[in-house]
Amino acid sequence: MAEHEHVRVAVIGSGFGGLGAAVRLRREGITDFVVLERADSVGGTWRDNSYPGCACDVPSHLYSFSFAPNPDWPRTFSGQRHIRTYLEHVTDVFGLRPHIRFGSEVKLMTWDGEQLRWEIETARGKLTADVVVSATGPLSDPKIPEIPGLASFPGKVFHSARWDHDYDLRGKRVAMVGTGASAIQIVPSIQRQAGRLTLFQRTPPWVMPRVDRAISGAERRLHRALPFTTQVRRGLLWGIRELQVQAFTKRPDELGLVERLAKRNMARAVKDPALRAKLTPDYRIGCKRILLSSEYYPALARPNVDVVASGLSEIRGSTVVAADGSEAEVDAIIFGTGFHVTDMPIAERVVGAEGITLAESWKNGMQALRGASAAGFPNWMTIIGPNTGLGNSSMILMIESQLNYMADYLRQLGVLGGRTALDARPEAVDSWNRQVQERMKRTVWNTGGCTSWYLDASGRNTTIWPGTTTEFRRATRRVDLAEYEVIRKPGGKGADADAKRAGAPARTAKRPARTTPASAGGASQQSEAAA
C-alpha cells in the first residue's frame, strides 16, 4: 500500500457486506476503491467461524446475492465451507481481487475537516479516502465473559469463532459455555468425541427442527438450464418469511402455536422430565432468535452429556463452577458466548468531525439514519448498522437495500460536485431512531420477557429492524438530502447556491461550509419508518 494512496471509496471488511459493496461500486462505474481486510482471505463471518457443524439457518437460495444466484447449492441449508466457497466465487467472477488489501486491519480512521476526507491508518500503512463504507459486521469480534480464574485455567480455552482445529477433543472432558446458534451446532458435532461434555446453559433457547436435505442433481440441472426457477425458489422463501413478520412485530401472542410445536419437538427427543424442565424456556418464542436443529436435543439426552441450568461463574484450577454451585472437572473450555454486537470495537477507531470517536457518540446507544449514517461522521456509512438486523429472514436482503442507499449517496455527491461531504443531521437521526424505537415497543423482541443480545447495556434494542424487508428497502431506495448537511471546502463549487437555498450566507471561513438544502431532496422519507 502506497504511503499516501488516495481513493474515492474505502470499504472495510470482505464479508457479505464488503464484497457486496465492492460489486455495487463497480456496477456504478466506480473503480477507484479499495477493500481493507484484516485477514488473509475473504469471507468475514464465514471465514472466521469454522467450528464443527457450522452452517447457516437461512435457506441457501435466500442466503445469497440476488445479482449472483448460485444454482449449485448442495443442500437446502448450506454449511460454512460452501458459503465461504460462494464468497470466493463472487470475488473472482466480479473481479474484486485487485481492489482487496489483505492484512490491512484498520487501526484508526480520522475525519479531516479541512480536506473533507478520511485519513486511514492500517496495519500496512496509511491512505486517504473521500468516503468510507464500514462493513465489519456485528458478528466479527468474539466476546468472552470475564470469569474469575480463567487466566489460570491449565487446559485449553477458545471461542467458537476462533476454533482450534489442532486440539483433539477425543476423550476429553469439555465444558461448552453458552446455548446460542453456534452452541447448538457444536454440541451434536463434538458430543460423540468428548469423553464428557458439560453444557453451561444460562438461558435455554427455543429450538425447532432443521428440515435440511441434499438438493438433488436434477434440481441443480434445472436451475442451471432455467435460471428463472432459482428466482422463483428464492421468491417463495422470501415471501413466506415476509408473511411471518407480523407475528414478530405486531402480534406476538400468535406465536403460541409455534411454542407448542417446539415443545413437541423437545418431547420427542428428551424423555427425561427433569431434563425437559431445564431445557424449557420461560419467555415467548421469538424473543431470542429461534434456533434450528434436529440433532441438539438428542445429543443432550446422551449419557455423556450434563446440562447445567446455570451460567459459568468461577474457575478453580481445572474445576469449573456454575452460579448454582455445581462443579465439573474439565480439560477444555469452549465459549459460544457471542460477539460485541452493540459495542462494536470498530466504533472506537472512528474519529469524526467533532474529534470524538463513534463509540463516544454512541455511548447512550447506537443509532444511525436509515441504519447507515451517524451524525458528526461525514461521508461515512455502515453496512448492517444499528437496527438493520433480522429475527426471521436473510440478512442479505438488508445488505442489498443498504447497497442501494450507498449507491444513491455516491450519486448525490457526484451531482453536488466538487470536494463535498454529506453529514447526517442530528435531528434526522433522532427522528428516524424515535420512530424505530416506537415500533419496537410492541415487538416480541421487546415484550417477550427475555434478555437477548439484541439489547444494549441499557436494555434498548439497537439491533433488530421492526418491520419487513420490503419496508426497509422502500425506506432506503434513495438518499433524501433534506436529512443531511452539505459540507464544502471554502469557496467550493456550489457553496453560494446551497447557502441561498438554506436561507443563509455562504460560509467561507477556515471551517468548510455546511449547508442544509431543505428542498434539494424533495419530500422527506422519514414517515416510511413508521409505515
Image (cartoon, rainbow, N blue to C red):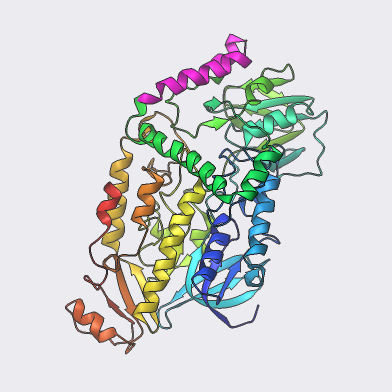
Q: Is residue 73 visible?
A: no
- Could you say which is closer to the camera, residue 46 or residue 171? 46
Instruction: Indicate whether residue 303 is drawn in magenta.
Output: no
Q: Residue at x 39, y 28 (%)?
A: 449
Q: What is the count of numbered marks?
A: 0
Vertical placement of residue 417 versus 321, above or below: below
Assign the N terminus to one quadrant of the image: bottom right
Q: Residue at x 51, y 21 (%)?
A: 262
User: Where is residue 219 shown, x and y percent of the image?
Assistant: 65, 40
- Could you say which is closer to the camera, residue 461 or residue 152? 461
User: Where is residue 411 shown, x and y percent of the image?
Assistant: 40, 73
What's the magenta region?
254-277
- Image-based side of 419 in relation to 46, left or right: left
Q: Can you tell which quarter of the image residue 498 is in?
A: bottom left
Instruction: Indicate whether residue 256 is drawn in magenta.
Output: yes
Q: Can you tell which quarter of the image residue 456 is in?
A: top left
Main secondary structure of the magenta stretch: helix
- Could you say which is closer to the camera, residue 405 or residue 377? 405
Vertical placement of residue 446 versus 255, above or below: below
Q: Is residue 158 visible?
A: yes
User: Where is residue 58 shown, x and y percent of the image?
Assistant: 55, 40
